Image: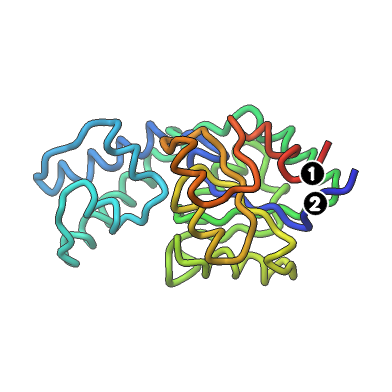
Amino acid sequence: MSARYTAVLFDFDFTLADSSDGVVECVRYALGKLGLPCPSTTTILATVGLSLAQTYERLTGRCDPGEVARFRGLFVERADEVMAAGTRIYPSVAPVLAALTAAGCRLGIVSTKFRYRMESILSRDGLREWFAVIVGGEDVGQEKPDPTGLLEALHRLGVAPDRAAYVGDSEVDGETACRAGVDFVGVLTGTTGRGALAVWSPVALAADLSGVPTAVGVA
């Protein structure tokens, strides 16, 4: 059966992969080096999907540009060491990608996470070849929920927004899809509940990624 959409694009963290261990370690490392108190694991994980600047402000209540730059540098420094090992691709990913591709969908990723890091993790697990485009945090000047990254991915694919769906786990993902004019499919594998995702009028809400093929019209 042909899919409803020409392209299906995905967020990365908590949508395709559980990066909890890596994210928590990197935030704790960066805040510790800055001499700042470390929030709980739950509080840290609630920032997944935000930019590092937004994460720092959310966790510390501070927004000094110099502090943000130091936090970002320390986070990336530690992430280069531990993030891949601290990230687990969900078991449902490979069969879902195969089903969507078989139905004629072109696939991509749009995330605030650095592209080189996502590519490393996907290559490790033999999944990189499924994605025709990956747009990461280093590829665009504006981070989600600004729609620039999502629109750039669609431009590279040659697909109009009304022929695409964006799959994500957070309110940021829902807002990004809305601002890009792309249908949103929410998955409940992150820290955001059904009610918060529903605000962004998803075409479907799925418990996990295995529900995405049905959501986009693939039997």
Marker disc for residue 61: none
| Residue 144 percent location from the top left of the image | 45, 60
Residue 94 lies, with reference to residue 57, above or below; the image says above
Residue 148 lies, with reference to residue 14, above or below; the image says below
Disc 2: which residue: 4
Name the residue rendered at 34%, 52% in the picture: 76
| Residue 214 percent location from the top left of the image | 75, 37
Mark 2 nearby-residue class (10 Å; few <14, some 14–19, many ≥20): some
| Residue 161 percent location from the top left of the image | 68, 66
Whole-number angstrom distance, CA of label 2 to CA of label 1: 5 Å
Residue 32 lies, with reference to residue 178, above or below; the image says above
> In the displayed structure, does residue 101 sit left or right of residue 50?
right
Disc 1: which residue: 217
Name the residue rendered at 72%, 69% in the picture: 160
Do callouts 2 and 1 mark residues in contact (Cβ within 8 Å)? yes
Q: Secondary structure at mark 1?
A: loop
Mark 1 nearby-residue class (10 Å; few <14, some 14–19, many ≥20): some
Query: Which amino acid lies under the numbered mark 1 shown in the image of this protein?
Result: Gly
Quarter of the image with the C terminus in it: top right
> In the displayed structure, does residue 143 sit left or right of residue 177?
left
Name the residue rendered at 55%, 42% in the picture: 121
Outermost residue toward the right in this view: 1
Mark nearer the N terminus (2 vs 1): 2
Quarter of the image with the N terminus in it: top right
Outermost residue toward the top in this view: 91
Query: Which amino acid lies under the numbered mark 2 shown in the image of this protein?
Result: Arg
Q: Secondary structure at mark 2?
A: loop
Q: How is the image coloured?
A: rainbow
| Residue 151 percent location from the top left of the image | 60, 69
> In the displayed structure, does residue 89 sit left or right of residue 172?
right
Count numbered badges in the picture.
2
